[in-house]
Image: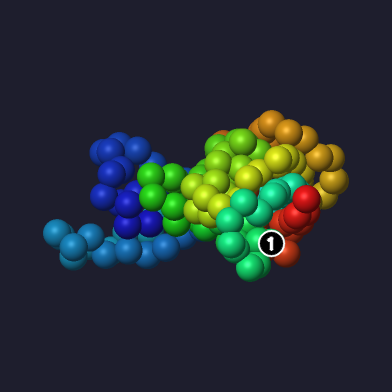
Amino acid sequence: AAALLAHKSLGANWNGAVTVNLTDPASGQTYPVKFDRPTDIPVKARVTVRNLGALTDVPAAVRQAIVDYAAGLQDGEPGFVVGASVSSFELAGAVNRQAPGIYVQNCEISLVTPTSWVVGQIAISLNEIASIVSGNIEVIVA
């Protein structure tokens, strides 16, 4: 709401299902800021890896790398953002970046429902945002 208030152009109307009353710090005036929240699209991943290093808990490291990537916690990576497709290649890269002792042999992704595994991308609409939780990441250590 604060970002919208700070960047709204004059003459543009507020629209959306969510309303937040926000006080403009410059004028002290309160504005009802309206906006829509994106629809959550839960996804899952199935990753086949080999441990090339001395990691003791490879599945946990893979899951953490993917969850961190999705949350935008890896340097230089925005993670899952509104309207951006989910890429199995980006998830594999996130694992390699955060856990370099792990070799990703295969990375498949799917919507949680219905399950349809793909190597590639899942399209996310402009009013949606993908999400993933640790419990939806299957790790196969080859």
Secondary structure of the residue carrying tag 1 is helix
Kind of residue sitting beneath label 1: Pro
| Residue 125 appears in the picture as rendered | no
Q: Residue at x 23, y 60 (%)?
A: 24
Residue 20 is situated, as x and y percent measured from the top left of the image, at 42, 63
Looking at the picture, tell me which residue is in the foreground, 135 or 27.
Answer: 135
Q: Residue furthest bottom?
A: 56
**Nearest the camera: 87 or 62?**
62
Residue 57 vs 5, above or below: the answer is below
Q: Position of residue 73 (x, y in %)?
A: 45, 56
Q: Is residue 42 left or right of residue 53?
A: right
Residue at left 75%, top 54%?
Answer: 141
Q: Of residues 44 and 47, which is closer to you in this image?
A: 47
Q: Is residue 50 left or right of residue 22?
A: right
Pinpoint residue 97: horizontal percent, then vertical percent.
49, 47
Where is residue 70 drawn, in percent x and y?
55, 52
The structure's colour scheme is rainbow
Q: Is residue 50 among the parts visible in the rendering? A: yes
Count of numbered badges drawn on the protein: 1
Quadrant position of residue 140: bottom right
The reply, left or right, for residue 94 in relation to residue 24 is right
Q: Circle 1: is it few (<14), some (14-19), or many (20+) Cα within 10 Å?
A: many
Residue tagged 1: 59
Asked whether, in this view, residue 6 is left or right of residue 137, the answer is left
Q: Looking at this view, name the residue that lies furthest to the left.
A: 26
Q: Quadrant of the N terminus?
A: bottom left
Q: Which residue occupies the foreground of this view, 70 or 95?
A: 95
